[in-house]
Image (cartoon, rainbow, N blue to C red):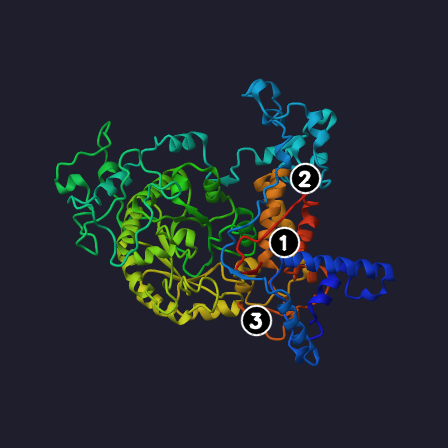
Amino acid sequence: RRFLTSKEEFHAFLRAGREPGGQVGDDSEEEKEEEDKEKKEEEEEQVSSCQSEPPAKRVRAEDLDQDGENQEDAGAEEKEHPERKRARGQNKSRPCMKPNHYEQSRLCPSVIQGCPGKCFFGPRCRFLHDVGEYLAGKPSDLGQRCVLFDTFGRCPYGVTCRFARAHLGAGHQNIVNAALAQQWEGKLLVRNNLSKDLQHRLRKRKFVFQKAEEYLRGLKPRGGDGKGGKAAGEQEVSNCTAPQEGLGDGGSHECPVLQDKAEEPEAEALQSPSSRGDGVSPSLPTVGPLTDEDVTKLRPCERKKLEIQGKLYLAPLTTCGNLPFRRICKRFGADVTCGEMAVCTNLLQGQSSEWALLKRHHTEDIFGVQLEGAFPDTMTKCAELLNRTIEVDFVDINVGCPIDLVYKKGGGCALMTRSNKFEQIVRGMNSVLDVPLTVKIRTGVQEKINVAHKIIPKIREWGASMVTLHGRSREQRYTRSADWEYIAECARIASPMPLFGNGDILSYEDANRAMEMGVSGIMIARQVPVGALIKPWLFTEIKEQRHWDISSGERFDILKDFTNYGLEHWGSDTQGVEKTRKFLLEWLSFLCRYIPVGLLEHLPQRINERPPYYLGRDYLETLMASQNVDDWIKISELLLGPVPPSFTFLPKHKANSYR
């Protein structure tokens, strides 16, 4: 109770910037007037800006031993601002946060690499070639030490590094620590990169999908009615040749479908054309002698097994589940990691931003990727593409994404209502992959109508190696409690196929109760608040069976490590620093919801509880508890220096917000 406070006192404490032992009221009269003026300006800005924090978390009158004046004041505040409207779900009107000041005077990559005479564009190059001119407009350095130089003995960003003073010698020459650089020579730290040759072939549609084409030929209807493949009651979705949801293979631009008469595809339709004897010749000419690999397929018992029962699985987390964050979770004990959800059509088009989601750090020993798509042609081709070009231990199909952008195109949760297309996707991807195929689903689409128990036996029959069930429906999204009784029922139905449970895991006690339900393992994923994002040390708590009262200094060290990993991954130049800042702020929008164990009256913290305003045990702990965007930016400035001019930030998730 002694930590409880009001909204005004909370923000006054942060503005004062003092430790709890100091007296905020010791300031002079002039400072008080300035604070009052700043407070009024901030309140005006919060009313007019969409970046304001959620409505005040009011403390009950009995907790503060007051006579109910707080409730009256709160009601008056609500009446003063009738223009505020509640906006749930994805933030679709975010301001553009990409800083463009570094685009105006960038140094040519040929100069950074030390070969200015080899610029490919010559006199037509739009970048600077004069190092002196570049340094005259370069922002000041952010620190004395460069994490890339200290770790690898060499910083590839040279004079553009925002910590360049640590490794620049006479004449702006980049210094190299030869002994340290030799230790890392030849070691591949990050795998699954997109090569220029592969990107060119994908953009020119010259990549050959032999196995996928063979499977898809077996799905095309032999009749001329042009119908098929749609489940009863299925709504029409956009064609797979739309710009965002399909690439096509240069030949047919139709979505492969099944016969109209059958709910389940016949075995004959799933065979290759040559085995049916219908006289259809293969579209791809064969060259060379026939080998056993051409005619022999792996049996299910010969496939690589996914042995992760009982392990802690970090789920794919869109935006926040990036490579630096996964490194943090691996350090705290995560056994299995998965990349962020990647859209299959964007991968087939060779988009660099989408392929970046597939990158794998060398410390991720069990790693998978998650694909999202709505049609069997694009999903099967994408599975074959990844099977031949990247190193993964499993591939996961996203059948749980609830956002409208995905659902209305027929992907994510919509596949649970499109059983024919769902089956074609699972069977097709399973036929072209050499690694296990897993599926992540929800309880259903509508809140009180569960359908997962009907779909899971079919998924097992179609050839999936594992299913992960999120105990909420699409309509529930990430709110309300997960239905673990239903997850336990589905785990019994899924046997002998492993089923991982997902939902409301925020402590080792929650994990123990979940394992008692009979699931094969638990996934720490994206609830609101989010288990892994609010407490990345949750994996340590589960393995050591304890509540960790982690200090604010230890939490700040975690943010330091994330910053170093981000500079290592995205770069230490201005562009890399601002990208690291962006993802740090996205993470802080979840991390601020953690309540220190030492402040709780009852353990553990519940995942859907919202605390009142409270003061931490020191200034940093209080600052980390703030849900104000400006305070998150202040934390980022402690790690990455001052923000660029006119910098703005608004969380991407915006699960519960007001504008």
Which tag, 3 or 1, sits closer to the chain's start? Answer: 1
> Depth check: 474 or 119 in front?
474
Which tag, 2 or 3, sits closer to the chain's start? Answer: 2
In percent of the image, x 53 and y 64: which residue is there?
A: 542
Q: Is residue 433 left or right of residue 275?
A: right
Residue 47, quarter of the rendered image? bottom right
Disc 1 crowd rating (10 Å Cα; few below 14, some 14-19, many 20+) is some
Tell me the distance, in whole angstroms, between the alpha carbons under discs 3 and 1: 22 Å
* Residue 122 rendering spot, x and y as whole percentages: 57, 18
Q: Is residue 143 left or right of residue 402?
A: right
Residue 268 visible in rendering: yes
Residue 572 visible in rendering: no
The answer to whether the residues at label 2 and label 3 have Cβ atoms under 8 Å apart is: no
Residue 167, quarter of the rendered image? top right
**Does 509 sit above or below residue 267?**
below
Residue bearing mark 1:
558
* Residue 629 rendering spot, x and y as whole percentages: 64, 55
Name the amino acid type tagged 3.
Pro
Residue bearing mark 2:
146
Which tag, 1 or 2, sits closer to the chain's start? Answer: 2
Q: Is residue 211 left or right of residue 531?
A: left
Name the amino acid type tagged 2.
Cys
> Depth check: 176 or 262 in front?
262
The number of numbered discs placed on residues in the rendered structure image is: 3
Residue bearing mark 3:
604
Disc 2 crowd rating (10 Å Cα; few below 14, some 14-19, many 20+) is many
> Depth check: 609 or 639 in front?
609
**Does 266 sit above or below residue 141?**
below
Tell me the distance, in whole angstroms, between the alpha carbons under discs 1 and 2: 18 Å
Q: Is residue 174 left or right of residue 496?
A: right
